[in-house]
């Protein structure tokens, strides 16, 4: 095993920052020391195999993106990033672990869906990976399979209150699954939108000739998100199940979560970078000739972008500061414009839903530090430490301390990152919703379990380095 000393940097955790050197032995962190310390009896820099100079830079735990969709089947196509391309892009952006979603649909067996996702990921990932389990067909067989997931290291499952005919679960099905969640400690994750209402609104808009991508967000009105969020919270309260609401985009949904948390419920929420930075108004204005006036399709995701005039974006930042929202994931579900997003030309309902962001999350959230939206410590907490605690990885992941995996990012606050397909883009997409964004910082070095994946602007990772993460139960519950 080789040894590495990361020296001269500022180690940032969720609780503070300190000038310190970090000693890595093999795949683990073995010491965090005062700069230049000889506590181990010698000058470490002269005895280790490699030294990384982090002077003037931040040393942070590797990012954990707890919501990704590699190769997800959706809308007659598949998410364009494979586990190979998507995890390479993650590494470029300072993310060293992902939690993706194994899929089970109506009529399918949970075990078969999980086995298929293991086949897709095994031997193909550049960074470590785990799975949540999508339960898209709630029946006696899938309910019986839920408790057995814990032994597989899968301690969370996702349900949908949207997409009737695809993933949708009704209230009775959700209740039954949540009862198991309450009994076992499994985390119930919820896509909280009123799908039947959305489908009616979307059909009415199309009949009125309103077919452009912008109307995707109009059909998925914030009232549908707030109502479903409230309903999920009530079912969680009734059963005692912990609840994690994914991709929260409406300030009214945040208010429902905040009230539940104030009442002592184990209710949590994440948002995504697009809901912090992008808006419906910008989607409406995206009518350039590059994609034949269809450019707004690159912003189509669910939940949708919200109106800036109504203040949703500012409220998301506020909720992150106040811990009414606990995490920022990407919901990375990329589709190319050509032959994928373009399936929805003439009917926004056929546009595959998703934005590619896995490469940019750490940078975009750091820009929030630069602009004063969040602190440096909160940046680390939102992107690494809380994901580890929420999903049963803390201690091994999400922290720089002896015994933890050596998942480390050296981040340069004096660097600069220009986001663009022809600049810093490694995702398997022909466009970027983040084209033209400028970041006042730069990912310099990325280390996964002691192995350098990125340094000096070069990629050193290897396919198959990433290992499956068997997760414990959530460490965030009260």
Image (tube, helix red, strand yellow):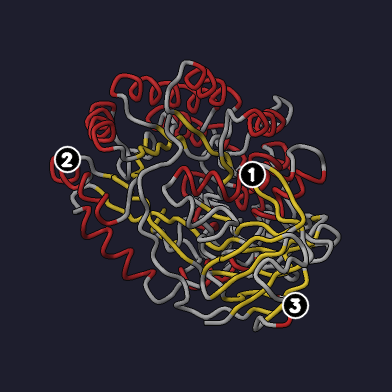
**Are the residues flagged by discs 1 and 3 in contact, CB closer than 8 Å?**
no
Q: Is residue 470 left or right of residue 435?
A: left
Identity of the residue drawn at 68% across and 66% down: 39
Nearest the viewer among 129 and 280 is 129
Q: Height in image: 463 above or below 111?
A: below
Say which residue label 1 marks: 14
**Displayed quadrant of residue 307:** top right
Q: Earlier in the sequence, mark 1 or mark 3?
A: 1
Q: Are marks 3 and 2 in contact (CB under 8 Å)?
A: no
x and y, in percent, of residue 268 in the image: 48, 32
Mark toward the viewer: 3 or 2: 3
SS state under label 3: loop
Tell me, for residue 139, which label it has, or none.
2
Q: Position of residue 26 (x, y in %)?
A: 53, 76
Q: Is residue 247 above or below residue 360?
A: above
Distance CA(mark 3)–CA(mark 2): 52 Å
Residue at the (23%, 27%) spot, across then down? 172
Is residue 213 left or right of 420 when viewed as pictured? left
Q: First in sequence: mark 2 or mark 1?
A: 1
- Residue under circle 3? 456
Q: Alpha carbon of mark 1 to alpha carbon of mark 3: how far?
A: 27 Å
């Amino acid at each position: 095993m080789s040894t590495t000393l990361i020296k001269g940097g500022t180690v940032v955790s969720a609780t503070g920052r300190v000038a310190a050197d970090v000693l890595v032995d093999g795949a683990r962190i073995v010491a965090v020391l005062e700069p230049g310390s000889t506590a181990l009896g010698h000058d470490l820099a002269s005895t280790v195999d490699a030294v990384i100079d982090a002077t003037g830079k931040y040393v942070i735990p590797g990012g954990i993106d707890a919501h990704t969709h590699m190769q997800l089947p959706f809308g007659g196509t598949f998410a364009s990033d494979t586990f190979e391309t998507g995890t390479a892009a993650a590494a470029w952006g300072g993310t060293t672990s992902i939690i993706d979603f194994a899929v089970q649909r109506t009529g399918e067996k949970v075990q078969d869906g999980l086995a298929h996702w293991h086949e897709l990921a095994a031997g193909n990932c550049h960074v470590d990976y785990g799975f949540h389990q999508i339960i898209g067909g709630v029946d006696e067989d899938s309910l019986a399979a839920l408790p057995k997931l814990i032994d597989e290291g899968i301690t969370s499952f996702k349900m949908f209150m949207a997409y009737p005919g695809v993933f949708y679960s009704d209230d009775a099905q959700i209740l039954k699954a949540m009862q198991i969640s309450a009994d076992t400690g499994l985390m119930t994750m919820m896509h909280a939108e009123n799908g039947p209402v959305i489908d009616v609104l979307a059909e009415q808009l199309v009949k009125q000739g309103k077919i452009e991508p912008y109307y995707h967000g109009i059909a998925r009105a914030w009232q549908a998100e707030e109502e479903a969020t409230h309903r999920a919270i009530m079912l969680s309260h009734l059963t005692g199940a912990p609840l994690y609401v994914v991709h929260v985009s409406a300030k009214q949904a945040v208010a429902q979560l905040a009230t539940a948390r104030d009442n002592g419920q184990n209710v949590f929420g994440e948002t995504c970078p697009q809901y912090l930075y992008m808006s419906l108004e910008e989607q409406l204005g995206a009518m350039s000739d590059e994609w034949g006036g269809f450019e707004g399709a690159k912003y189509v995701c669910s939940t949708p972008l919200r109106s800036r005039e109504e203040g949703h974006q500012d409220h998301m930042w506020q909720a992150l500061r106040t811990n009414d929202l606990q995490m920022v994931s990407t919901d990375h579900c990329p589709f190319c414009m050509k032959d994928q997003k373009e399936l929805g030309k003439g009917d926004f309902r056929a546009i595959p839903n998703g934005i590619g962001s896995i490469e940019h999350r750490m940078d975009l959230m750091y820009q929030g530090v630069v602009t004063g939206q969040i602190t440096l410590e909160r940046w680390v907490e939102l992107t690494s430490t809380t994901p580890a605690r929420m999903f049963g990885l803390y201690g091994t992941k999400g922290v720089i301390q002896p015994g933890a995996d050596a998942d480390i990012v050296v981040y340069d606050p004096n660097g600069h990152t220009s986001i663009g397909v022809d600049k810093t883009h490694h995702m398997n997409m022909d466009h970027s919703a983040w084209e033209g964004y400028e970041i006042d910082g730069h990912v310099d070095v990325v280390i996964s379990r002691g192995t350098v994946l990125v340094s000096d602007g070069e990629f050193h990772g290897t396919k198959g380095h990433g290992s499956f993460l068997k997760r414990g139960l959530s460490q965030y519950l009260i």
